[in-house]
Image (cartoon, rainbow, N blue to C red):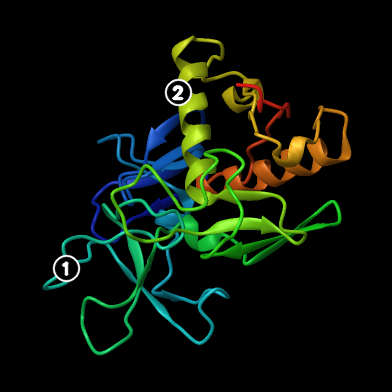
């Protein structure tokens, strides 16, 4: 176990791995598995939120520098949203100042800042975009829906343009399924198997392709979703047993 100390927190933190979800007390987003935990006051942090850096860069915004803030209050701003997932900023954030007005700029949750601009999965390239022409395979919409934000949010789109996932949709569908599995009591928090191993990531296979669990397409999507989920939940040790099937008939 690694013991660390948060600058403004009087107690020590241990790196723990529990087989259950939690809400990070830093960014206020969901986490799973690995977390830095204060045993005295139950304060929990994503590894990304505990090991934050003063400044970062991201390939999606070439030449821009993001500064870390525990709380971001901008005069004249009615609230901020993460430019990656489109959800509200509630706590820890990386912010890049740009433009003539203070309210201009980009924001990233600490975990979202780890999303790579390009991912190559089983020979298929998935590229981050903020403007898309195809429907998300989960919500079936081109534009991000379900948030209060005007931020378009990022999407991963395959190089061929057929396969598209909103980052927001991946995060929300997994959060819902994790909650359902945990509520049913199917996994003990001390078990070696993760609750996520029992989740079926149900994906709408666009263009009528039958993506059975043995198909090449099914394998590619399973690995892709596993990678994104691990980043968004702040736990690189997560493993998913994903089952891909076509739900176009629903």
- Residue at the (57%, 60%) spot, across then down: 115
Q: Is residue 17 above or below residue 65?
A: above
Residue 56 in sight here: yes
Which secondary structure lies at badge 2?
A: helix
Which residue is located at x 64 percent, y 20 percent?
198
Q: What is the number of callouts on the image?
A: 2
Q: CA distance from mark 1 to mark 2?
A: 33 Å
Q: Which residue is mark 1?
A: 77
- Packing grade of label 2 (10 A; few <14, some 14-19, many >=20) is some
Residue 215 shown left or right of residue 126 in the figure? right
Can see residue 17?
no
In this view of the protein, which residue sits in the foreground, 30 or 204? Answer: 204
Q: What crowding class fits label 1: few (fewer than 14 Cα within 10 Å), some (14-19), or many (20 or more)?
A: few
Residue 235 percent across, percent down from the top left: 56, 44
- In the rendered view, tell whether residue 101 sits above or below residue 181: below
Task: Indicate which disc, 1 or 2, sits on the residue closer to the N terminus.
Answer: 1
51 left or right of 80 in image? right
Q: Foreground residue, 189 or 228?
A: 228
Where residue 179 is drawn, which disc sits there?
2
Residue 140 appears at what percent x and percent y?
55, 41
* Relative image position of residue 32 (x, y in whole percent): 49, 35
Q: Is residue 7 left or right of residue 213?
A: left
Q: Quadrant of residue 43?
A: top left
Name the mark nearer the viewer: 1 or 2.
1
Outermost residue to the bottom: 100
Viewer-proximal residue, 2 or 160? 160
Relative height, residue 205 to residue 180 (above, below): below
- Residue 221: image quadrant is top right
Furthest residue toward left: 75
């Amino acid at each position: 176990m690694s013991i660390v100390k948060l600058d403004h927190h009087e107690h020590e933190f241990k790196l723990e791995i529990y087989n259950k979800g939690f809400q990070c007390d830093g960014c206020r987003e969901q986490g799973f598995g690995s977390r830095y935990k204060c045993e005295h006051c139950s304060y929990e942090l994503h590894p990304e939120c505990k090991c934050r850096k003063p400044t970062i860069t991201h390939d999606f915004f070439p030449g821009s520098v993001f500064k870390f803030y525990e709380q971001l209050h901008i005069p004249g701003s009615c609230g901020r949203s993460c430019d990656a997932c489109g959800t509200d900023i509630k706590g820890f954030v990386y912010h890049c100042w740009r433009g003539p007005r203070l309210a201009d700029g980009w924001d990233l949750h600490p975990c979202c800042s780890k999303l790579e601009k390009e991912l190559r999965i089983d020979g298929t390239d998935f590229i981050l975009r903020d403007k898309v022409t195809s429907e998300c395979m989960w919500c079936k919409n081109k534009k991000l829906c379900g948030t209060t934000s005007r931020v378009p949010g990022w999407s991963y789109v395959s190089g061929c343009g057929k396969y598209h996932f909103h980052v927001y949709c991946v995060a929300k569908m997994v959060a819902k399924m994790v909650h359902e599995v945990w509520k049913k009591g199917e996994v003990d928090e001390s078990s070696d198997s993760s609750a996520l191993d029992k989740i079926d990531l149900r994906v709408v296979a666009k263009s009528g392709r039958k993506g059975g669990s043995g198909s090449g397409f099914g394998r590619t999507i399973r690995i892709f979703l596993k990678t994104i989920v691990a980043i968004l939940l702040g736990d690189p040790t997560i493993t998913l047993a994903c089952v891909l099937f076509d739900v176009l008939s629903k």
